C-alpha cells in the first residue's frame, strides 16, 4: 500500500471478488457474509477496494451511510435492467437504504422514479427526487394508482425489493399497454421483504417478454462510478440515526421493528468515537 494513503477517510467496496474482472462479479459474498469484519473496529482489506472520499462537508456518520452495500445493489439493479434516461422506473421499498439510493440514482442517469411506500413518507421521498409516491396498500387498486401517477403510460422497469404478492402487480404496471412501449419490460429483483414466494403465470412472462434480473451486488466499475458521484456531491446521505457498537443488538432490533418514521440508513459507531461521530446523529432515546 502507498504510505501516502495512511489516514485517508473513505468507503470500502465491500465485495469479495473472485477475480480481477472489472465488469462482472458472480460471487455473492462480502465482508460480514463470507468473511469476518462486518462489525469489526479494525479490518484488513485490499487497498484497491478502499476509495478515498475527501469531502469535508460530510460527517463521518453521513459518509458511512453512503456505504456501498445499498448503493452498489441499487446501481446494479439499474445497470442489469439497462435503465436509461427518460424511462419510468417503479421503486418498491422506497424508504429503505436501497430504495432511497435508487431514487437518487434514477435522477442522476435521467430516469424518472416512482416510489412505492407509505403515505406518511410522501413528502420526504418527493423531496429526495421521487416523481410521485404510490401507497403500497389497497392491492386491488395498486396498478390503477400507478397508471394515474404516470398519466396512463406503462412503467418501463421495476426495481423489486419486496417480492411476495406485489411482484405480480409490479409486472402488471409494465405490460398494461405493450403498444406504448419501446423496450422490453424489465424486472430487477434484490429483496423479498414482502415474502420469498411469488405466484406468477409464466405465460405472462414469455408472452409479454418480461426480462427478469436477479441482483445481489455490483462490480468494480460500478463501485468506482458511485464513488465519483459521491465525491461530486450528486449522491446525498440519507442517515436515519446512529447507534453505539455496544448497542448493536438494540440497533438490529430497532431496524427489524422500524416504524413509519424510518427513512434511509442507520450507522454503527465504535464506542470510543461515539461522542464525536455518533452522538450528533443519535436517536433521542439512545443519546
Image (cartoon, rainbow, N blue to C red):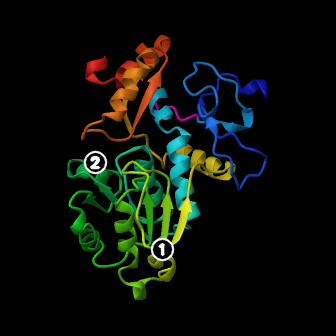
Q: Residue 9 in magenta?
A: no
Q: Which mark is residue 224?
A: none
Residue 115 appears in which quarter of the rendering? Answer: bottom left
Regarding residue 117, the answer to whether it shows in the image is: yes
Within 10 Å of disc 2 (Cα), the crowding (few <14, some 14-19, many 20+) is few
Gap in angstroms between the C-alphas marked 2 and 1: 37 Å
* Residue 57 seen from this side: no
Q: Is residue 1 above or below residue 69?
A: above
Reading the image, the residue beneath label 1 is: 202
Q: Secondary structure at mark 1?
A: helix
Name which of mark 2 and mark 1 comes first in the sequence: 2
Q: Report which residue position mark 2 lands on.
A: 124
Q: Position of residue 155 (x, y in %)?
A: 39, 72
Above-or-below relation of 128 to 183: above
Hey, which quadrant is residue 17 in on the image? top right
Left or right of residue 66, residue 120 in this image: left
Left/right of residue 224 with respect to residue 156 in the rendered view: right
- Give the percent coordinates (x, y) of residue 264: 38, 41
Mark 1: give few (<14), some (14-19) or many (20+) Cα within 10 Å. few
Q: Quadrant for the C terminus, please.
A: top left
Foreground pick, 262 / 103: 262
Q: Quadrant of the N terminus?
A: top right
Q: Main secondary structure of the magenta part?
A: loop
Between 65 and 158, the one nearer to me in the picture: 158
Q: Secondary structure at mark 2?
A: helix
Where residue 217 appears, x then y in whole percent?
59, 48
Is residue 199 shown above or below 54?
below
Q: Nearer the viewer's eye, disc 2 or disc 1?
A: 1
Q: Residue at x 49, y 34 (%)?
A: 63
Horizontal arrangement in the rendering, residue 110 relative to residue 254 (left or right): right
Residue beneath the point at 44% across and 82% down:
181
Q: Which residues are magenta?
A: 54-59
Amino acid at each position: 500500500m502507498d504510505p501516502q494513503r495512511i489516514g485517508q477517510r473513505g468507503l470500502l467496496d465491500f465485495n469479495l471478488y473472485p477475480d480481477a474482472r472489472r465488469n462482472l462479479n458472480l460471487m455473492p459474498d462480502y465482508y460480514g457474509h463470507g468473511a469476518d469484519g462486518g462489525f469489526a473496529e479494525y479490518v484488513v482489506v485490499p487497498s484497491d477496494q478502499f476509495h478515498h472520499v475527501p469531502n469535508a462537508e460530510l460527517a463521518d456518520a453521513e459518509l458511512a451511510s453512503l456505504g456501498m452495500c445499498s448503493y452498489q445493489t441499487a446501481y446494479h439493479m439499474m445497470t442489469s435492467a439497462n435503465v436509461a434516461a427518460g424511462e419510468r422506473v417503479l421503486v418498491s421499498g422506497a424508504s429503505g437504504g436501497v430504495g432511497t439510493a435508487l431514487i437518487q440514482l434514477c435522477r442522476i442517469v435521467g430516469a424518472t422514479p416512482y416510489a412505492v411506500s407509505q403515505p406518511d413518507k410522501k413528502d420526504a421521498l418527493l423531496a429526495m427526487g421521487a416523481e410521485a409516491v404510490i401507497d403500497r396498500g389497497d392491492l386491488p387498486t395498486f396498478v390503477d394508482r400507478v397508471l394515474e401517477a404516470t398519466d396512463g403510460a406503462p412503467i418501463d422497469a421495476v426495481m423489486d425489493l419486496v417480492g411476495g404478492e406485489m411482484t405480480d402487480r409490479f409486472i402488471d404496471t409494465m405490460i398494461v399497454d405493450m403498444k406504448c412501449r419501446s423496450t422490453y419490460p424489465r424486472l430487477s429483483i434484490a429483496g423479498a421483504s414482502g415474502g420469498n414466494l411469488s405466484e406468477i403465470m409464466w405465460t405472462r412472462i414469455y408472452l409479454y417478454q418480461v426480462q427478469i434480473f436477479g441482483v445481489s451486488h455490483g462490480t468494480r466499475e460500478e463501485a468506482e462510478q458511485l464513488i465519483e458521484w459521491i465525491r461530486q456531491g450528486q449522491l446525498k446521505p440519507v442517515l436515519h440515526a446512529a447507534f453505539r457498537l455496544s448497542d448493536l443488538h438494540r440497533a438490529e432490533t430497532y431496524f427489524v421493528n422500524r416504524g413509519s418514521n424510518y427513512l434511509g440508513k442507520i450507522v454503527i459507531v465504535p464506542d470510543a468515537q461515539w461522542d464525536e461521530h455518533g452522538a450528533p446523529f443519535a436517536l433521542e432515546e439512545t443519546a
